[in-house]
Amino acid sequence: MRILVDARFTRTDQHDGISRYGAGLIAALATTDDVVMLISDPRQLALLPDVPHVRVTSPLSPAELFIALRINRLRPDVVVCPMQTMGSWGRRYPLVLTLHDLIYYQNPTPPGFLPLPVRLLWRLYHLAYWPQRMLLDRADVVATISETTARLIGAHRLTRRPVLLVGNAPQPAQSHRDPAAPRSPSLLYMGSFMPYKNVETLVRAMQLLPGHTLHLLSRITPTRRAELSALAPEDRVVFHDGVTDAAYQDLLHDSTALVTLSRAEGYGLPVIEAMATGTPVIASDIPIFREVGGRAAAYVDPDDPAAVAAAVRSLDDAGTWTAASRAGVERAATYSWATSAHQLRQACRRAVAEFDRRRAGRAAGALP
């Protein structure tokens, strides 16, 4: 099957969640299928697997409305987009669109890296569910990365199309950390600093954790840095403002735990990445983290700094820490890009069948 995968959401410097998801799927899928990538910037290739590619316009360009006319000429058997916003007007191919989460309906602040006009449209788009329905119903199959999001899609009746799981997965760990090796009292947070991520509670918990240091790994604006710095003793919070994958792995191998107190997530990839390394996880008690972490993570009230501090202190016990480390490795082993690629292949086959069925229905005069 000739599968065209939209890789235009790949970052040009270092991966974010969407970028890593797309790259991981492409690499795994390319081992068994004829995969071609769409890119919009040659710099994206540095973060993508070595498979054939075609350069087209940016997904944020007005030309996106007509991207299907360009793709038609490539004659794919099926097209997969790791987002739901791909233009589809005039398409003559089966299409799989992906909806990761519904976070921005409750948390409408758009990502800051988007251009101002796109941020304005983003806010308008999330004021009601009908624009999402219109986009998703343009696909033949809708993929999502978790059962939690799939249930929300059903609850809000966001599409008439089949909704199939194409899960996320951690990158293959270079090695599992040795549970008997010394570890630092460092705590790690990997993620953005948007309001729903609730980093404030995590920083406040550091007031109750003398001897521990919180490492905030992602890029941060000066304004957000100043806001968070005011909430905890200066010597207990370290701002990295972005780290490489290698540095991230080094920190995971050395730290006491990864902590995330988000109030909403589509998946929470750092949770499974930490577990794959053998680093215990402390997470907010929300459905998606329960789905991803199972019994291997420690769950806390995301509004209670004292509960966070207590969970951290429990890991000072060597037996507790070792048990959490081993449970995390076992849990992470249930996820793999090979499994995700198999799920995507099934979604592609279903999209082909749905496309053919709907085309036959239109030819017979039935409604689509």
Image (tube, rainbow, N blue to C red):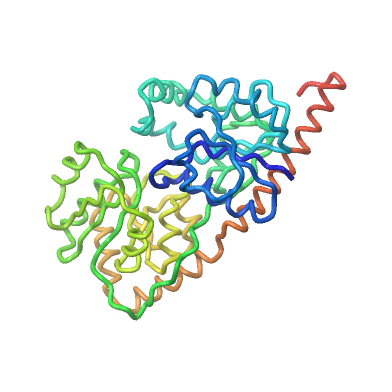
| For residue 267, above or below residue 330 | above
Location of residue 130 (image quadrant): top right
Where in the figure is residue 44, as x and y percent of width and height? 47, 41
How many numbered marks are there? 0
Looking at the image, residue 360 lies above or below residue 275: above
Residue 276 on image: x %, y %: 46, 65
Most foreground residue, 328 or 22: 22
Residue 214 as seen in the image, left or right of residue 104: left
**Looking at the rendering, which quadrant does residue 223 occupy?**
top left
The residue positioned farthest toward the right in the image shown: 364
264 or 2: nearer the eye? Answer: 2
Q: Tell me which residue sits at (54%, 50%) in the image.
A: 49
Foreground residue among 171 and 131: 171
User: Which image quarter is the C terminus in?
Assistant: top right
Q: Residue at x 46, y 59 (%)?
A: 293
Residue 40 at x, y = what percent? Answer: 51, 33
Rendered view: 273 above or below 102: below
Q: Is residue 262 left or right of residue 151?
A: left
Quadrant in which residue 182 is drawn:
bottom left
Q: Seen in the image, is 32 located left or right of residue 114?
A: right
Which image quarter is the N terminus in? top right
Q: Position of residue 291 (x, y in %)?
A: 51, 55
Residue in the picture at 39% in, 73% down = 177
For this rendering, which residue is in front, 162 or 222?
222
